[in-house]
Image (tube, helix red, strand yellow):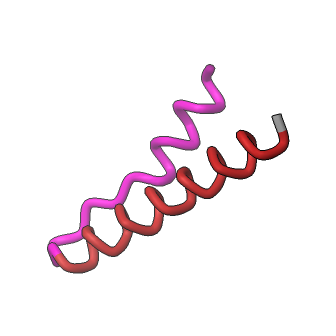
Amino acid sequence: MHDLLRLARSLRCDPSDPGQAFRHRLGVGLAVAALILILSLLG
């Protein structure tokens, strides 16, 4: 659990540019969606 929290903290991005923040969140969301898809196909 601590590793997940550490990973979540490292993925946080608080830039002053809203466009950059949106791109970062979009990238993280797509990575999580791809991981869920791969795990569901394997399981």
Above or below, 17 relative to 24: below
22 and 4: which is toward the camera: 22
Q: Position of residue 20 (x, y in %)?
A: 27, 78
14 and 41: which is toward the camera: 41
Query: Furthest-right residue in view?
Result: 42
2 and 21: which is toward the camera: 21
Q: Position of residue 37 (x, y in %)?
A: 65, 50
Residue drawn where x is 26% and y is 69% of the image:
21
Residue 10 within the magenta-colored segment of the rendering: yes
Above or below, 40 relative to 1: below
- Does residue 12 appear left or right of residue 6 in this picture? left
Residue drawn where x is 39% and y is 52% of the image:
12
Above or below, 31 relative to 4: below
Q: Quadrant of residue 26?
A: bottom left
Q: Position of residue 27 (x, y in %)?
A: 45, 68
- Does residue 18 appear left or right of residue 31 in this picture? left
Query: Furthest-top residue in view?
Result: 1
Q: Which quadrant of the figure contains the C terminus?
A: top right
Q: Magenta stretch?
A: 1-18
Q: Position of residue 31 (x, y in %)?
A: 56, 60
- Does residue 33 appear left or right of residue 16 in this picture? right
Residue drawn where x is 44% and y is 56% of the image:
29
14 and 40: which is toward the camera: 40
Residue 23 within the magenta-colored segment of the rendering: no
